[in-house]
Amino acid sequence: MKSIATLSLVLLGASLALVLKPLLWLHPPAAPGLWSVYDATFRSAKYVDLTHTITPQIPVWEGFGPPAFSPAIAGRDIPGFIRKGERFTYEKHGFEAMRYALSTDQLGTQLDPPAHWAPEYPAIDELPATYAIRPLVVIDISQQVQADYGYSLQVSDIARFEQHYGRIPAGSVVFVRSDWSKDWPDPALATRHPFPGVSLAALKFLHLERHILFHGHEPLDTDATPTLEGESWLMHHGYAQAEGVANLDKVPPVGALVAIGFPKLGGGTGGYARYIAICPPDWKYGVSSSQIAEAPLPRSDKPLVFDASAGMRVRK
Amino acid sequence: MKSIATLSLVLLGASLALVLKPLLWLHPPAAPGLWSVYDATFRSAKYVDLTHTITPQIPVWEGFGPPAFSPAIAGRDIPGFIRKGERFTYEKHGFEAMRYALSTDQLGTQLDPPAHWAPEYPAIDELPATYAIRPLVVIDISQQVQADYGYSLQVSDIARFEQHYGRIPAGSVVFVRSDWSKDWPDPALATRHPFPGVSLAALKFLHLERHILFHGHEPLDTDATPTLEGESWLMHHGYAQAEGVANLDKVPPVGALVAIGFPKLGGGTGGYARYIAICPPDWKYGVSSSQIAEAPLPRSDKPLVFDASAGMRVRK
């Protein structure tokens, strides 16, 4: 029996070593807390920006004016340094800064808090800190939209998606791919009607049956109904939503995460948002940290200068 | 020998089952790609906001004026709906929005791209998408600052930190806790001099020896030297930096991650940033998704209204 016990122990040891090795690789002892997760997953992940660049030329809903950018000027005299109203320059003052006149918070890629329509619900700065990173679901209706530009996401599209990819997880962010954003930044997008939408029934299903965190779409409105019934229902029931989302053809339908960022403007009714998809390392699109210069950042041959005709800083 | 082989297989099976069980728990088959990471780590993590709320009253460097907030108005006539210059209201139009006059992009909690000082280096919209989530290191100099308010982080402080907590990982974000932000939003902070800083030698060590992504500090400037030598060195060498960071006493020195977000303003020289620390589930501060109402968000008894004396929307 001694030899049986010995052999069993040897086999047990070998099988434990075999199975423990990947566990140790996932959790090297030197990385405390969530750093091990970063090392195992995020260091080699592929990052895809889902955000439009905000410029004075982007499409904005016709009721609001466009934003205006200009170089920052001195708000007061600082003796021996600058006079009130004078522009800060790299040459004289060592730095430059920007001044923004933003006619609306409904600009570019957005995160609408419900206070945009319903003042009894949270403003942008009242959203909880847990709105930071989430599972990302991308439902593709671009084929339906090619056949009918005014198509809206239906509950049947969600059912078909779940048949292929499994149940949409609670707490996830669900973005609807329509390819509307392929024409961005054509100013005509601001008035093009109809446009691809998300039906009220689909929004109710996603929130009431699947308990998602929020949905997002490529156009600047949720649907083309006269009363904007989808956005109205969301906001008046305490739900946020994303608008003006981009690059949804560059992320997988399931398995990616989305990092959610926006400035914390007190009492704000809209969010100038940043959405970045974090995709598995073997995903075909996006960049990973190891592929690019991050710190220091790359130097350009063309300096950034304020161009009055573009109304913004450009490289030339 | 047959019985030995059988016994060994039984033992092997039992040991495999024992070791595989936690593996299966970490990676349930239903969660594809990075969703399993979310389920295992982020769903129960504690989120701590490291960001100040931007209001018209926050401290701003004296050379810039304060920001002004006002309700959005119509940029043009829309027959039957609104006249140019008229304010959008919940009652008449169904929604409201905000209008911002931001005298500077150096406002509140920031991410400075190097183009703030050096136009040959990236603007805020040129930072790569990989600036999204990172290991967070917090070095505490609050004791030194209590004894000497003009104290700056030294290389010796970093060496002491590493003796306790291990080597600072490449690609991490390093925030320096001074407790300067405890007096926020006292307007006196804008002119208080000296203030807690980060020495040029410490910045060089963090970037050239540890290869961090960027560092951050609580005050609105990197150091109190007449030439702002630390910020000047960073920007002219292609490094970004965070300013106006808050709540560093609520996050662990090692083991947390930080989510980094900011709007993508074309050619922008500063970032209205959002930093959210993601801490292990057993961390004593912060909120987790399961503890709060996320969707729908909680309804307030006090509606959000624009208050002319505060210059912003407040609840009352």
Image (spheres, coloured by chain):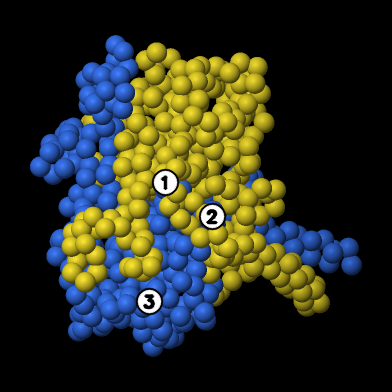
Chain colours: A yellow, B blue
Q: Seen in the image, is B236 located left or right of residue A183?
A: left
Q: Residues within 10 Å of mark 1 (few under 14, many from 20)?
A: few
* Chain letter belonging to callout 2: A
Front position among marks 2 and 3:
2
CA separation in Å, label 1 and label 3:
32 Å
**Quarter of the image holding residue B226?**
bottom left
Q: Residues within 10 Å of mark 3 (few under 14, many from 20)?
A: many
Picture disc at residue A143 = none
Give the quadrant of the C terminus of chain A. bottom right
Residue to which mark 3 is pinned: B230
Q: Amino acid at mark 3?
A: Gly
Q: Residue at x 34, y 24 (%)?
A: A63
User: Is the residue A246 above or below the residue A237 in the image?
Assistant: below
Residue to which mark 1 is pinned: A308
Respond whether the residues carrying marks 1 and 3 are from the same subunit.
no
User: Is the residue A34 above or below the residue B298 in the image?
Assistant: below
